[in-house]
Amino acid sequence: MPPKSKVTKEMILDAAIAVVRRDGFEQINVRKVSKELKCSTQPVMYQFETIDSLKQAVYKRADQLHSEYLMTVRQEQDPILGIGLNYIRFAVEEPQLFRFLFQSGYATENSLPEMIDSEELIPVISAMQEGTGISEEIVKEVFLTVAMFAHGYASLIANNSLEFDEKLIAEHLERAWNGAVLAAEQEG
């Protein structure tokens, strides 16, 4: 029976997330992750046979962190506005993880319909539907509109092209949401 590995997959993923946060997703490699763990490269290569399998696992972990962040809406906030603002706040607080998730090419969804129907978005769509009482179909249409709006803000902020002004952005998100709901209801 082989000896139990002291360096677990979880430890490796935590170290790789630390590398992304500090240096960017382009810097995920076995040497940097091993250095973060203060170990040789062997335990990392034992757990992940290829660098691509490591990057995919790190992407999945970053996506989990992002989803948890999105769903932590302040109680005093409207859940819809809160999710949109959290999306943008994530780009402010975690710009490297944001870039990895949305600007690296690692996303498995390649189109808006794939994104809106992804398993990861089920809790978000459900929360939005519960918060508004409108149909799932309309929520999905509205979500796509607001998501593109929020993504634009978040991308600009994550790439240091715009300062974060929560009050102004909240006003714009609310207008985008209200306009998208009105348009979807008129079409439906």
Image (tube, rainbow, N blue to C red):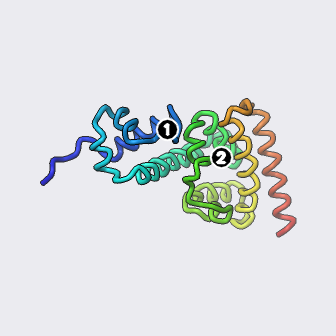
| Residue located 37% across and 42% down the image | 30
Q: Nearer the viewer, residue 35 or 97?
A: 35
- Give the percent coordinates (x, y) of residue 173: 77, 44
Residue 9 vs residue 145, the one in the foreground? 9
Residue type marked 2: Ile
Q: Where does the C terminus fall, quadrant-wise?
A: bottom right
Q: Alpha carbon of mark 2 to alpha carbon of mark 1: how far? A: 24 Å
Q: Secondary structure at mark 1?
A: helix
Q: Which residue is mark 1?
A: 20
Task: Give how far across and how far down residue 8 sits, in percent.
Answer: 30, 45
Q: Is residue 148 above or below residue 170?
A: below
Residue at horizontal 80 percent and vertical 39 percent from the top: 171
Secondary structure type for disc 2: helix
Would you say 77 lies left or right of 40 here?
right
**Residue 186 pos. (x, y %):** 87, 65
Point out which mark residue 86 bears. none
Q: Classify mark 1: residues with Cα within 10 Å, few (<14), some (14-19) or many (20+).
A: many
Question: Residue at the location (67% across, 65% down)?
Answer: 113
Mark 2 Cα-neighbour bin, 10 Å: few <14, some 14–19, many ≥20 = many
Image position of 6 (left or right of 137): left
Q: Quadrant of residue 43?
A: top left
160, above or below 118, in the image: above
Which circle's residue, 2 or 1, is located before the other in the chain? Answer: 1
* Residue with the mark numbered 2: 83
Task: Answer whether labels 2 and 1 touch (C-beta < 8 Å).
Answer: no
Q: In this rendering, is residue 168 above or below 150?
A: above
Q: Is residue 39 left or right of residue 149?
A: left
Q: Amino acid at mark 1?
A: Val
* Residue at image point 62% right, 47% down: 103
Which is closer to the viewer, label 2 or label 1?
1
